[in-house]
Image (cartoon, grey):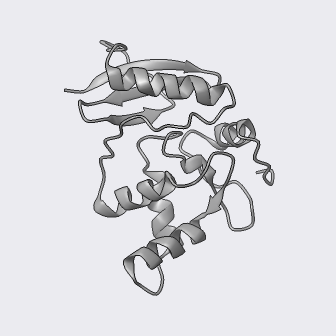
Amino acid sequence: MIYFTNYGSPLGNILLAADDEGLTTLDFSEKKGAVSPNHPILREAARWLKIYFSGQNPGFTPPLHLLGTPFQTEVWRLLLDIPFGKTTTYGALAKEIARRRGVRRMSAQAIGGAVGHNPVALIVPCHRVIGADGSLTGYAGGLDKKASLLSLEGITFQPF
């Protein structure tokens, strides 16, 4: 069964969805209809968001159930290693995936494709991935939200 709730953030509504294994969706949208705000995983995610939007590092990750291809989930798990208040590039992620797989190189564009399909934004911090030149690049929630999230974490960046 899938459980839903809406979280009112400073950047607009956030849809949270979970199954009994973990959080499956976090995105800037809203679901109408039945919601289950008392599901324990959704409560943990809401607690994480409350701490995050206060400008603090939550220091924990709610249970996740990342649904994607093996490559996508490998990239998304790597995103979880990017510390609060830090950024990385698509190229750096590609080098790390290549290293872990024991291959010579990995496409930064392939990494970008996986990052762009991250179903659990913010908690799986795809907003912390920037261009090689330090500029902001695509974000499913919009570049204005990405800029706001980075600023909240005290990260400076080149204007988009």
Q: Horizontal placement of 97 versus 1: left or right?
A: right
Q: Position of residue 17 (x, y in %)?
A: 35, 28
Query: Where is 100 relative to 102, above or below?
Result: above
Q: Quadrant of residue 3?
A: top left
Q: Position of residue 160 (x, y in %)?
A: 76, 51
At a point 67% along the width and 25% down the height, the residue shown is 54
* Furthest-front residue in this view: 59
Q: Position of residue 67 (x, y in %)?
A: 29, 47
At a point 34% along the width and 13% down the height, the residue shown is 38
Q: In terms of depth relative to the viewer, which is nearer, 107 or 41?
A: 41
Image quadrant holding the N terminus, namely top left
At a point 57% along the width and 33% down the height, the residue shown is 58
Query: Where is 88 relative to 142, above or below?
Result: below
At a point 34% along the width and 64% down the height, the residue shown is 71
Total marks placed = 0
Q: Position of residue 135 (x, y in %)?
A: 74, 58
* Furthest-left residue in this view: 1
Q: In terms of depth relative to the viewer, which is nearer, 74 or 69?
A: 74
Q: Horizontal placement of 61 versus 69: left or right?
A: right
Query: Where is 94 relative to 102, above or below?
Result: above
